[in-house]
Image (cartoon, grey):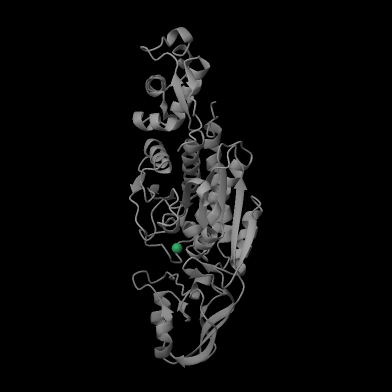
Amino acid sequence: MTRPLWVDEKTRTASLEIGSSMLALIRELYPIGRSITGPGLRATVARLSEIVPLQVTEVPSGTRVFDWTVPDEWSVEEAFVETAGGHRVVDFNESNLHVVGYSRPVDAEMTLAELRPHLFSLPEHPDWIPYRTSYYSPSWGFCLADRVLKSLPDGRYRAVIRSRIAPGSLTLAEYVHRGATAEEVLIFAHDCHPSLANDNLSGLSVAIHLAAFLRSRATHYTYRFVFAPATIGSLTWLAANEASLPGIRHGLVLSLLGDSGPIHYKETRAGNLPIDRAAWHVLSTEFGGSKRLDFEPWGYDERQFNSPGIDLAVGRLTRTPNGEFPEYHTSADNPNFLSADALGESWLACLKVLEALDCDSRYVNLQPKGEPQLGRRGLYRSMGGYQDVPARQLALLWMLNLSDGANSILDIASRSRLPFGLIAGAAADLQQAGLLAPAPDAGLGDR
Ligand SMILES: [Zn+2]
């Protein structure tokens, strides 16, 4: 049976519009003070739930997750540094990046020299505020522009952080789209960063808009979208769902999808799985300038999914990778750093990668002795209206040549270096003309 393709010209046009609504969502979520626990995380999940209803799970502080423990919950009421005269030189109300994440409460007067070890800036970018956290070692601190730091006169200062660190819970959110099979594709995006846009409001926005697209669609696979804090969140989710992990066949971690750099696919630990082949085939044939990255045990939550005891087939899609653009983890990673076009293109690329897995299938050539006479069956004639006749013609010949029941559409697309959609279209035409039949195990059940 042919599985109808998801992406047509209408979807491509829609991706431009979807790019604009993704950027609008990012602007809306940007001011929220998120962390790995707490009210900002819940507010973010609640807003995403308005687009696609998410199932929310609260995991109590103190829960053991593999070698880690879910931390106490953190929230901030206010935080500032003021001069002896009461002039605020740093204020959490102006940017939530000003406070080191998980800062413990403080209200103390001190000299600039005493305050100095608690202040963090970026001398190489004097106007940017850095993003810092201290989740697991109790401390407190402020982040500020180096220009402001350098302008502070000697004297006494008052540092105030009215924060709360107390038992609570860590928020996980999921959306499951049921497909024809219970086998799953996992899409993961971290949601714990405060006012940072590319990292990772772009990933949240692309993921929730992929969920919205799939929602109204009949799919082969079941799709599980997970929104959780980085590291501790993915670990918590994995620990809570360990029994059902064998049902996950493919997966992607999504992040950094709104900047102007080329799309990067980071391969799985194994490096040669269907998700690796689907992602790289789609990117290399249809998204010019894309780059493939070797696996390394560093980066985002693909580290946890590819750990030896979990070993899931999860790759990662970003544009410019983490740490490779100067705005990374600073106040310069704001919505103005992103574009609707880049977000729309990233969304389309993700969709096409998933399509290449979901719509993949195997066929058998029913006329394998010599080339069948295509003209007699109207297959050459039917190409008259297309501008890409040579490619379509090649796609028919490749499909016939390699459809021995062992090669799938994705295999044939990779071998021929032709777009997946073109090969899948040829398969549909050939099947209609009676030249191809689904292979006995067309559903790729043994993958
Ligand atoms: Zn980050």
Instruction: Specify the farthest residue to the top.
Output: 376
152 displayed left or right of 40: left
- For the image shown, how many numbered marks are present on the structure? 0
| Above-or-below relation of 240 to 137 | above
| Above-or-below relation of 345 to 41 | above
121 or 293: nearer the eye? 293
Q: Residue 315: image x %, image y %?
A: 42, 49
At 58% from the left and 37% from the top, the residue drawn is 219
Q: Quadrant of ligand 1?
A: bottom left
Q: Residue 198: image x %, image y %?
A: 47, 57
Q: Residue 410: image x %, image y %?
A: 42, 33
308 or 402: nearer the eye? 308
Q: Residue 88: image x %, image y %?
A: 53, 83
Q: Quadrant of residue 171?
A: bottom right
Residue 22 visible in this rendered orientation of the protein: no
At 42% from the left and 80% from the top, the residue drawn is 119
356 or 349: nearer the eye? 356
Quarter of the image where the C terminus is located: top left
Quarter of the image where the N terminus is located: top right
| Above-or-below relation of 13 to 430 | below
At 47% from the left and 63% from the top, the residue drawn is 231
Q: Quadrant of residue 74?
A: bottom right
At 39% from the left and 89% from the top, the residue drawn is 113
| Above-or-below relation of 415 to 302 | above
Residue 144 visible in this rendered orientation of the protein: yes
